[in-house]
Amino acid sequence: MKKIFYFMTTFCVALAFTSCELKDDKEYFDENASQRSSTNIENVEKILKAAPNGWLMEYYGNLGYGGFNVMMKFDGDQVTVASEQIGPSHKAGIGDDGKVVTSTSHFKLEQSMGTILSFDDYNPTFHYFSMPNNPDGIGDTSEGMYGDFEFRVMKCTPDSIVLSGKKHQNRIYMLPIPADKPWENIITEAEETEYFMSSRSYTLEGADRTDTTDIQIENSGRCLIFTYKDSTDLTQTVVAPYIVNKDGFEFYNAVNVNGYELDGLLRGDTDEYFLFKNNPNLQLNTYMPTLAESLITGSWYLRHSSLGDYAQSKWDEMVDVLMVSGKNDTPIKLYYAIFGLYNNKLGFNMISGPDAPYYGMAVSTVSETGDQITIKLLNSQNNRDGRDYYNKYGWKAALEPFVGTKGRTFKLSCDYPRKPKYITLTDLNEPTNIITVWADSYYFMDDNMDYYLDD
């Protein structure tokens, strides 16, 4: 019995010592983990603030939109952000003074299964990408552009930082901006490259192209879309999101198109073709559409300031009518006026108050070079809103500069035939009837933004 008592006493004492040791070890490892986390956060913060001219973030939200250049400078607990401008409501881009537009807000670093970089204070430049209801209507109302504002720090050195979006897990690279490089140059270089390399469609060519498969290649936003039929006659679609810099298109990931590994395009010296970074024996050849073709296959936005004297007076009459046509004589605001192909229908469209009027048109090319067209109205193609606006709210008069009574013939000109930013229509019979339409969306009353202030 004594032996049993002695054994139990010895076991309990040993257990007590073991418990103490485990407790001490736990505290030791917890303390080390905490210290490691604190050290890591301090290291990330030090590196973020050490870049004298800040960091260039290659930002991706929904990959279907491609990537965007975002500049950041960290100082104290504040971050100053600039970006390429995505939409008219985005506080970004280059201002009227020629300087980059910036916003400054708070940031923090914290521990949550690793180091988290959080932009926790609203920044109109940066949070534009992650707002649930994007102010320019990009994306859906619940997720917007599917951007993140909290990121896991996957790698952090003075030469590069790799982040992963906490919510959507997109990979984000950050690179230090050279000390002597103005932020304005990053934006203008990207604009110039995108303009130079843009084409409505491309063809895949080169010495290493050995098959005869028809591969259709289009540019949508900042994505190249490859469509072809595989060996089993199934249609395959491969999307290559990219970001633009002075050297070309940098792909988010390499893509495989019918057995060809493709990864990024180099700008080069000619806009007729662009070589792939990983294979100079493959290239994308650009396509040169006629201006008539560009006009009828795209959505073109009207701006009040770009209507000639003849057309502007007609549209002013319609706007005056709309200002007292809402409930209890309240205004119906005209947001967008769109010419060309929209919702897979060729015609005139508007976004006006809660309404979306549509009226069809027919366009015929009257020159071999495709730079002269005749436009006629199709009274048989419209919707209910279209008929109401045409018959009640002055749209008939506003459309007259485009279609006349039996059609109008225009000479077309533009800035860059391969992919125009704008196309100007000059009436061959009415010299004051000159209308410029734009590829980028913008509010119709662009020269009177006070018109929209009470929205």
Image (spheres, helix red, strand yellow):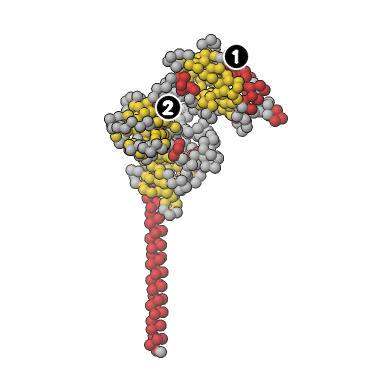
| Residue 326 x %, y % | 68, 29
- 294 sits left or right of 157 in the view: right
Q: Quadrant of the C terminus?
A: top right
| Residue 369 x %, y % | 42, 15
Is residue 245 visible in this depiction of the protein? no
- 251 sits left or right of 379 in the view: left
| Residue 409 x %, y % | 52, 13
- 365 sits left or right of 261 in the view: right
The residue under the point 45% across, 36% down is: 65
Where is mark 2, residue-wise? 200
- Specify few, some or many for label 1: CA neighbours under 10 Å numbering under 14, 14-19, or 20 or more: few
The tag earlier along the polypeptide, 1 or 2, is 2
The residue under the point 40% across, 43% down is: 172
Q: Quadrant of residue 330?
A: top right
The Cα–Cα distance between marks 1 and 2, rounded to whole angstroms, is: 33 Å
Disc 1 marks which amino acid? Thr
Q: Quadrant of the N terminus?
A: bottom left
Disc 2 marks which amino acid? Arg
Quick check: 34 above or below 429?
Answer: below
240 or 205: nearer the eye? 205
The residue under the point 40% across, 31% down is: 216
Q: Quadrant of residue 388?
A: top right
The residue under the point 55% across, 40% down is: 141
Quick check: 24 above or below 96?
Answer: below
Mark 1 falls on what kind of element?
loop
Q: Which mark is residue 405?
A: 1
